[in-house]
Amino acid sequence: MVFEREIGFSTKGSLDMVDITSEVGRVVRDSGIEEGMVLVFAPGATGAVITIENEPGLVEDFKRVLREIVKTKADYLHDRIDNNAASHLRASLLGAGKCFPISRGELVRGIWQQIFFVELDVRRRNRRLVVKVIGE
């Protein structure tokens, strides 16, 4: 069986992080699938899906590390076209999707493991995520 739903929301721009754990869990429960997996996918080239503990200090540390790994201004060739090369590079490193197991009708994750969408583009965006539940 396959069940699919989209989650829509707005972001505030660069490095806005949106906790989507409860929405993904709701889609899993609504699917009626007891055993299987769920894919959470962000269409587009400047967003990412990650797991991280939803602790304010850790979230800020994550943002700081991203800024250090991929500098905002570094004479990127793409910036001559669209001024968001760092957004694309960060998204490529983090990835657009994640898969999670489903057991007994519930999303399986660690106690401190929340699911986040990370906005990597330089401006506010209206985003949609595809959540696909596969199983029986």
Image: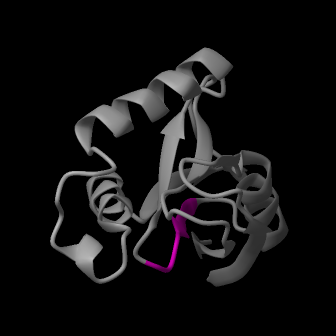
Q: Quick check: 136 above or below 110?
A: below
Q: Is residue 40 magenta?
A: yes
Q: Quick check: 120 above or below 21?
A: below
Q: Is there any visible trace of residue 32 in the rendered image?
A: no
| The N terminus: image quadrant | bottom right
At a point 33% along the width and 54% down the height, the residue shown is: 90
Residue 77 location in percent, x, y?
A: 15, 72
Residue 35 location in percent, x, y?
A: 60, 59
Q: Is residue 25 left or right of residue 73?
A: right
Q: Quick check: 58 above or below 49?
A: above
Residue 71 location in percent, x, y?
A: 28, 44
Residue 97 location in percent, x, y?
A: 44, 63
At a point 29% along the width and 32% down the height, the residue shown is: 68
Q: Magenta residues?
A: 36-44
At a point 55% along the width and 25% down the height, the residue shown is: 60
At a point 74% along the width and 72% down the height, the residue shown is: 7
Q: Main secondary structure of the magenta part?
A: strand
Q: Is residue 67 left or right of residue 60?
A: left
- Please identify the quarter of the rendering in which residue 130 is found: bottom right
40 or 57: which is nearer to us?
57
- Please identify the quarter of the rendering in which residue 136 is found: bottom right
90 or 7: which is nearer to us?
90
Q: Is residue 21 left or right of residue 102?
A: right
Render colour scheme: one colour
